[in-house]
Amino acid sequence: MRLGYVGETSIECSPLLLLLVVWLAISGTLAACLTVLLALSLHELAHALMARGLGFRVERIELQPFGFVARIERAVGWNALAVSAAGPLFSLLTAMGCAAAGAKWTLPFVAAFGKANLSIALVNLLPVLPLDGGRMLRVFLSRFFSEDTCLNLGAAMGMLAGGGLLALGIALLLRGGRNATAAIFGLFLFLAALRERREGGHARMDAMLRRHKALRRGESIRVVHIGVHKSMSVSAALRRMQGGAYTVIDVLDDDMRMIGRAEEARLLAFLARSGGNIPIGEAMRIDRGPKG
């Protein structure tokens, strides 16, 4: 449910959030849960501010039952690491500040807020997607493995961890426990990891469409040039595209001379039409579209 816009950032609210607030008010746990929601929302705000500071666009903010979720234009490399680390770092610093304040004054809200921030930081540092720890691990693994391999590995670990927590939570409930936190978080983690894996297959096309929309809004986009050998496959060349920029690929021969230039839109169109196993040099001969 879209509430409106702040600048060019869409603000959306999940109907489940409204139902959750009503249920919490009835059950008498609204204050405690709002404390956690505040900590989660500030955690996401730290991600968004870091992204804006690095020049990336915050596309939309979703008000979910587990807090505010910022959907940010995808960063790569050290920028992605900085954006991912901003949330846990902020939560840890906030927890430390609350602990320092609690040592001098007895403030129940500060103590609860500090515990919530510490829990959020530790959980988000788990090395599984779509948590922050998984995104940071993905940055390091991308230096050794392909983007698809990193995505599939991180998502699989997320689904495994989520499924394990869900099973543990259900087992505790069946044994007479009343706290469903583990089961609920496990279900959210499993579904979020599954969504991450499914959406990853369309990430390149989605990124190109977002950049196209940005141009139509009158914004500028970053353009990155890379060089590859003519024997490299189209799929391998696409995996080297920079996620946060429009990539132009210079195709080089054995003598390091440029024999052609291919933009990512052209390569994506060729991939959809003819597959990705063809060498990029041959693909450029087959595709008689305009050269850059």
Image (cartoon, grey):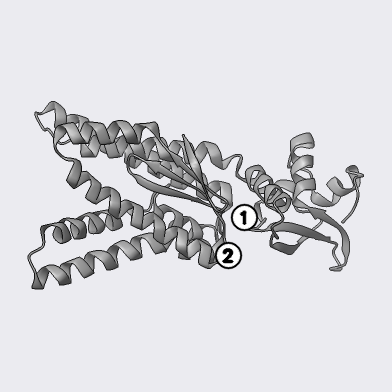
Secondary structure of residue under mark 1: loop
Name which of mark 2 and mark 1 comes first in the sequence.
2
Residue 96 vs residue 75: left or right?
A: left
Query: Relative to the observer, which residue lies in front, 195 or 33?
Result: 33
Give 206 or 284, whichever is nearer the viewer. 206
Quick one: 86 or 220, which is closer to the camera? 220
Instruction: List the residue tagged with mark 2.
Output: 55
Q: Position of residue 236 (x, y in %)?
A: 69, 51
Point out which mark residue 243 bears.
1
Disc 2 marks which amino acid?
A: Gly
* Residue 225 against residue 165 in the figure, above or below: below
Q: Amino acid at mark 1?
A: Gly
Image vertical order of residue 39 relative to residue 274, above or below: below
| Residue 290 image offset from top left, x and y in percent | 91, 49
- Circles 2 and 1 in contact, beta carbons < 8 Å: no
Q: Residue furthest top?
A: 174
User: For the residues marked 2 and 1, what is the alpha-carbon distance in whole angstroms?
Assistant: 13 Å
**Residues packed near mark 2 inside 10 Å, few (<14), some (14 to 19) or many (20 plus):** some
Residue 11 at x, y percent in the picture? 48, 45
Residue 258, picture quadrant: bottom right
Q: Residue at x 60, y 44 (%)?
A: 203
Q: Secondary structure at mark 2?
A: loop
**Residue 229 vs residue 183: left or right?**
right
**The C terminus sits in image quarter:** bottom right
Identify the residue at horizontal 66%, vertical 43% (top origin).
Answer: 205
In the image, what residue occupies the spot 22% across and 44% down? 33
In this rendering, the answer to whether 281 lies above or below 177 is below
Residue 137, located in which quarter of the rendered image? bottom left
User: Is residue 126 shown to the viewer in this render?
Assistant: no
Q: Is residue 215 visible in this depiction of the protein?
A: yes
**Which of the two marks, 2 or 1, is nearer to us in this view?**
2
As drawn, is 271 to the left or to the right of 9?
right
